[in-house]
């Protein structure tokens, strides 16, 4: 059994550091259930350190299930500070004193992380998750680098995008450690979209998309077929009920005929339920298709007036707009000589069905390729 720590060993450091130490020394966890990742991650390390079972204790009521506010059937587990802790019958792997020291250290680090990493202004990172790591393909997320001068004062805040797996926080390891300048990349993406919509051919394509009608004929026919099917089933049901009412109870085959009609009726009810579910599903598909059309039209209209609207949007509105428009953003592993990180943008909406090459910053080389086709779902 793996012992997370023991007396005489180095004291537990940061969870990420422990996870990296285990990985570097070839210590992997046993794959259980659906878990296929053999690496320890920071969250698992913290759960191990905070679990009193390793100190020979059994806890009751450490977590409780509560309903998520504003939802109908969603629940989540929350930790409780006051819970019952009793001696177990199993052997302790660490002393109670060492376990208590570890809890103090974990709590102290949690406060440290809250002060250093959490931006009180709740900075919105426009491309978080949309931007993809050029090495592992995972999402890259916005963060803030804090550096101090020799006199103790802070340098100007530096915001950057980094691969979410760079610190092995989720048990996945990525060696891409570059910190991509957030403001520069955000500006490059906006510049590409601006140059696209300023192209007359592109603008005409967008306007045609707005005026395009949604073809729901196949769904309309499907809905009508289910309605016809339901009318027949309802008629069959009424006929069966009428036949049951007209049965002669003095007939020697009364019970058999009644049983046959009841079985037929139950099967008809099952068919009605199936047809009603299919009708509801088809109507939902049509509503979704029309809703997508409305959403798409809104985005197309925003694209037509992109230069005017984008400049007036706040950070939250820009994030929402880019989330609806852009499927993913790809960057180069290394920054190009002309200063560009941006490699390609793939949009969610089908606009044109070929690659469209642009140049940024008045550079003579076309470094940025925008793939404007929607990925197959």
Image (spheres, helix red, strand yellow):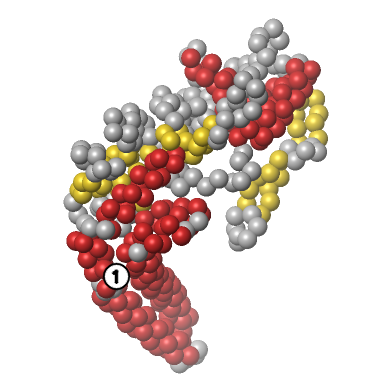
Report the front residue among 374 and 146: 146
At mark 1, the secondary structure is helix
Please state if 277 lies on the left or on the right of 335 as rendered: right
**Place of residue 375 in the rendered image (x, y in percent of width and height, measured from the top left):** 28, 50
- The quarter in which the N terminus is drawn is top right
**Place of residue 254 in the rendered image (x, y in percent of width and height, measured from the top left):** 46, 84
Q: Is residue 191 above or below residue 294?
A: above
Q: Residue at x 81, y 35 (%)?
A: 84
Q: Is residue 183 above or below residue 219?
A: above
**Place of residue 299 in the rendered image (x, y in percent of width and height, measured from the top left):** 36, 63
Q: Is residue 256 visible?
A: no
Q: Is residue 347 above or below residue 273?
A: above
Q: Residue at x 44, y 90 (%)?
A: 242
Report the front residue among 341 and 372: 341
Write down the residue under mark 1: 210
Q: Residue at x 71, y 45 (%)?
A: 64
Q: Is residue 335 visible?
A: yes
Q: Quadrant of residue 69?
A: bottom right
Q: Residue at x 32, y 53 (%)?
A: 193
């Amino acid at each position: 059994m793996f012992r997370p720590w023991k007396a005489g060993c180095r004291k537990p450091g940061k969870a990420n550091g422990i996870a990296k130490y285990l990985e570097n020394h070839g210590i992997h966890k046993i794959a259980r259930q659906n878990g296929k990742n053999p690496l320890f991650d920071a969250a698992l390390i913290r759960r191990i350190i905070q679990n009193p079972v390793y100190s020979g204790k059994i806890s009751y009521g450490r977590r409780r299930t509560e309903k998520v506010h504003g939802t109908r059937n969603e629940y989540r587990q929350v930790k409780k500070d006051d819970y019952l802790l009793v001696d177990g019958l199993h052997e302790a792997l660490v002393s109670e004193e060492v376990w208590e020291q570890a809890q103090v250290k974990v709590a102290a680090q949690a406060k440290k992380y809250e002060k250093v990493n959490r931006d009180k202004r709740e900075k919105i990172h426009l491309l978080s998750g949309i931007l993809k790591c050029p090495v592992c393909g995972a999402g890259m997320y916005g963060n803030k680098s804090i550096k101090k001068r020799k006199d103790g004062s802070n340098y100007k805040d530096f915001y950057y995008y980094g691969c979410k797996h760079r610190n092995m926080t989720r048990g996945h390891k990525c060696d891409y450690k570059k910190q991509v300048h957030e403001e520069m990349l955000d500006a490059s993406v906006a510049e590409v979209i601006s140059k696209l919509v300023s192209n007359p051919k592109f603008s005409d394509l967008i306007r045609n998309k707005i005026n395009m009608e949604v073809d729901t004929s196949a769904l309309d026919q499907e809905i009508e077929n289910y309605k016809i099917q339901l009318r027949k089933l309802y008629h069959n049901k009424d006929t069966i009920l009428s036949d049951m009412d007209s049965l002669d109870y003095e007939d020697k085959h009364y019970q058999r005929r009644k049983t046959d009609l009841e079985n037929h009726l139950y099967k008809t009810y099952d068919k009605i339920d199936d047809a009603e579910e299919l009708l509801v599903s088809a109507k939902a598909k049509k509503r979704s298709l029309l809703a997508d059309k409305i959403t798409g039209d809104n985005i197309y209209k925003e694209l037509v007036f992109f230069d005017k609207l984008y400049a007036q949007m706040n950070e939250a509105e820009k994030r929402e707009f880019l989330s609806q428009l852009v499927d993913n953003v790809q960057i180069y592993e290394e920054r190009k000589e002309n200063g560009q990180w941006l490699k390609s943008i793939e949009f969610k909406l089908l606009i044109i069905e070929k690659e469209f090459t642009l140049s940024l910053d008045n550079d003579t080389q076309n470094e940025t390729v925008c793939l404007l086709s929607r990925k197959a779902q």
